[in-house]
Amino acid sequence: MPIHEKHLIRPENIKSHDKLVMDGIDISGHWSTFIETRVVKDYNESLQDEIAALPGGEYVHRCWQCGSCTNACTVNAINPDFNPRYWIYLIRMGMESELLRDKDIIWQCVSCNKCTYVCPREVAPEGVMKATAHWLELKGHTPQSPSTIFDDVFSTQVIETGKIEDSLVVRNFFQRTGQSLTQDWLIEMVKRMVAHLPVKMLMALGIATVLRPRTKNWGGARDAIKEYVAEQDAHHRKALGLESLVEMAKLEAAAPFKQAAE
Ligand code: SF4
Ligand code: SF4
């Protein structure tokens, strides 16, 4: 029973006749509504394995399609097209082209984890949503989302310095997403910080911004983390058949950066 929700039937697949009489019986209007037969020929038989190879997607195979995740989902409550249960079904069936029809909304998961708490099979649907969004980016189906860029900026700084320097994270994120540092809300936030934070803390923030402190003797840890990250990255790309650098360059060219401010 793949489709539980009526709204999942695509409008273009619903056929009806304003005037239809069969064997003398008038079945016009909604009596003559049919769903066009759909033939899927382009299964990706590796789709479940590809999602399972990415962080968060490991338990996608456990899903038994109860629908509790979608029923509990914060985003589904305001947008019925956001449907974790359905996407997990498509992943398990290898229906990649159907999944790609929703590629522009999968990233909208707000990581509230309600789905994960209600799931009776410990699928961790929130993780599957993250893995799917990651998969879409790695495969070049969607550009890097602002969330991915933020993760990259944040983790790069932590790995390089062993410290989190908030203002630098914000500046680098804004720079990479093409956003201005003089947006009204940001200016207002800084004004309020200056007005309400203790002077000592403001001075510490200022000094950290200028001096960019590093954790002492961090070099060994940094190199070990970098090595691990590179190993994991290679593992993920291999699982998705993306080892070729040439192929990656083509994908990156085909999926230019998405403005965060849109
Ligand atoms: S974590 Fe994402 S998929 Fe799960 S309930 Fe929250 S918004 Fe929905
Ligand atoms: S709650 Fe868990 S088992 Fe039920 S449909 Fe969602 S992921 Fe599958």
Image: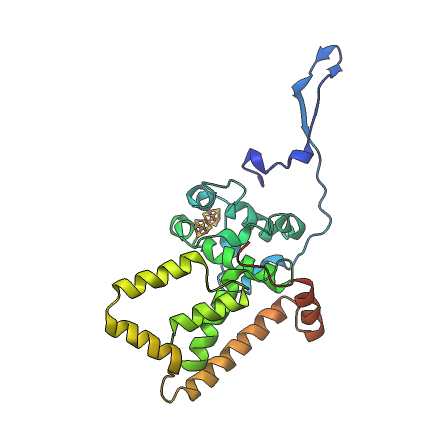
Residue 233, quarter of the rendered image: bottom right
Looking at the picture, tell me which residue is in the foreground, 117 or 186: 186
Instruction: Tell me, yes or no, if residue 123 can be seen here.
Output: no
Q: Is residue 27 left or right of residue 6?
A: right
Residue 80: image location, x then y, percent: 51, 40
Instruction: Tell me, yes or no, if residue 240 can be seen here.
Output: yes
Residue drawn at x 38%, y 74% is: 165
Residue 247: image location, x then y, percent: 70, 70
Residue 152: image location, x then y, percent: 50, 70
Residue 202, quarter of the rendered image: bottom left
Residue 237: image location, x then y, percent: 61, 70
44 above or below 55?
A: above
Q: Is residue 252 left or right of residue 77?
A: right
Residue drawn at x 46%, y 69% is: 171
Residue drawn at x 29%, y 76% is: 203
Q: Is residue 36 left or right of residue 51?
A: right
Looking at the picture, tell me which residue is in the foreground, 218 or 177: 177
Residue 169, quarter of the rendered image: bottom left
Q: Give the total of numbered labels.
A: 0
Q: Which part of the image, by quadrant, shows the N terminus?
A: top right
Name the image colouring. Answer: rainbow
121 above or below 222?
A: above
229 above or below 29?
A: below
